[in-house]
Amino acid sequence: MASQDQEHFRDSIGTINDAGKRAWVYPKKPVGKLYEYRKLVSYVLLLFLFGAPFVHINGNQFLMFNVLERRFNIFGFPFWPQDFHLFVMMMIIGVVFVVLFTVAFGRIFCGWICPQTIFMEMVFRRIEYWIDGDRGKQIRLNNMPWNAEKIRKRLLKWSVFFVISFLIANVFLAYLIGSERLLQYITDGPANHVSTLISLLIFTGVFYFVFAWFREQVCIIVCPYGRLQGVLLDTKSIVVAYDYKRGEKEAGRAKFKKTEDRETTGKGDCIDCFQCVNVCPTGIDIRNGTQLECVNCTACIDACNQMMEAVNLPQDLIRYASEENIEKKTKFQFTPRLKGYTAVLIILIGVLSGMLFLRNDVEANVLRLPGQLYEHKAEDIISNVYTFKLINKTTRTIEDVHFELISHSGSIKVVSQETLEVPAQGLAEGTLFIEVKSADLEGEKEQLKIGVYSGERLIETTRTIFLGPRSYN
């Protein structure tokens, strides 16, 4: 672990130099077992990300977040503005899950699952390695004057980056407005949807800026998750960690010498090769301990393991471990803190499950017409006028819809029609009259329970207020 006089690294982030300017990071191309696992996970997630908007279940897009129209599809289930509380509950569960996962395993989400890391390291960075070469070639290319080779490589890289950014923007737009609408816009031609094209180009510009220039600064400066880990991690959290006990020993780290017996000299297993630093995508030295910039990508683990194997020393000098595991050799423990977060998560999932189970396919609202009083009709009947709105959350048309009073004797008459038809994922609205005998009313304001039927089947119930005379008997 870094000594007290070496703690200056905490005074600034790894991508800022001594002059306060941006220190461009040229990470060495990772190679190793964990990197291969990350590639597999990343490409599966990329396939899911690009495919999800174009998959439909029962006519519903698998995932859609139409903020403008306040319509959301989660795993093929549609959620309307009236279901916003369910969407909020899902978001809260997601946050609690990420918090629980971070307390237990550190920032592993950032290194393995975060779209920013996946796109940066598994798409854009790999293209950069293909065009510009590995770390040394990239540095030399950056330092050389603008000759034919540099212009050719820069134009090729920037063009490929722009095309991929444009593709990502299209997929992003498919999540927002729906894939069917996006494909329709493409078929119609950009000239017929200029505003959508402008939005698409803005998204493209943002993605290009992030992946071509801003890069790791998103994780370090913009993303709040990096700040959160400071309060979420503890000495029992599993993170990518350097075993300073083994790496330093009594005499500290030192360069490797073939003829030297490091065990006898008391030197640590760290040979000070700086491979873990050169391969880091955020430009830090993991040997300084857990840092804000570390996204747990495991590139340093692979690099260190390769060097340990090359000099015939045990691997896992850098590994997934907790501070207590390195200091005291303790194993992972399910702490009271983890138990508390787990309990909260289970309770929230239970509440959400109950809310989803009680959720109806039809949402009904019956409201008294503002400014209208009751009407006293023949045979001592009291009539009130209402507006109604029926929202069909399913992908099928609901036919033969009518209203009936459940709580009182009386009748409901829909203006201009007896039965209704509610279109798939649409709504039906209009005006109706409710008539109740005054003898059945007990007060000036009465709460009525109304049933919404499709044929003989009750599909929803709702309540409304009925006004009548002050005295009835």
Image (cartoon, grey):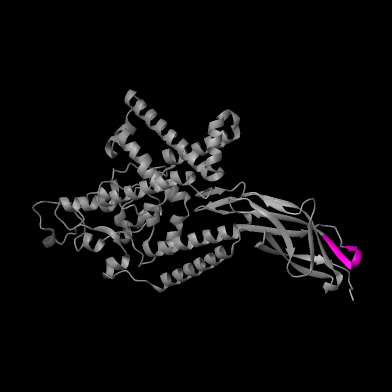
Q: Position of residue 201 (x, y in %)?
A: 52, 35
Q: How many marks?
A: 0
Residue 441 occupies which quadrant of the picture?
A: bottom right
For the view shown, which residue lies furthest in the left direction?
A: 259
User: As drawn, is 392 to the left or to the right of 369?
Assistant: left
For the view shown, which residue lies furthest in the bottom direction?
A: 473
Q: Position of residue 282 (x, y in %)?
A: 36, 48
Q: Against 104, is 142 above or below?
A: above
The C terminus: image quadrant: bottom right
In front: 243, or 6?
243
Residue 293 visible in the snapshot: no
For the view shown, which residue lies furthest in the top direction?
A: 148
The N terminus: image quadrant: bottom left
Residue 433 visible in the snapshot: yes
Instruction: Tell me the magenta residue range.
Output: 375-384
Q: Against 216, is 342 above or below?
A: below
Q: Against 258, is 99 above or below?
A: below
Q: Position of residue 106 (x, y in %)?
A: 38, 60
Give the residue displayed 79% in from the left and 63% down from the top: 411
Residue 108 occupies which quadrant of the picture?
A: bottom left
Q: Position of residue 312 (x, y in %)?
A: 14, 54
User: As drawn, is 158 to the left or to the right of 452?
Assistant: left
Task: Specify the principal SS of the magenta part.
Answer: strand
Q: Is residue 376 magenta?
A: yes
In front: 37, or 333?
37
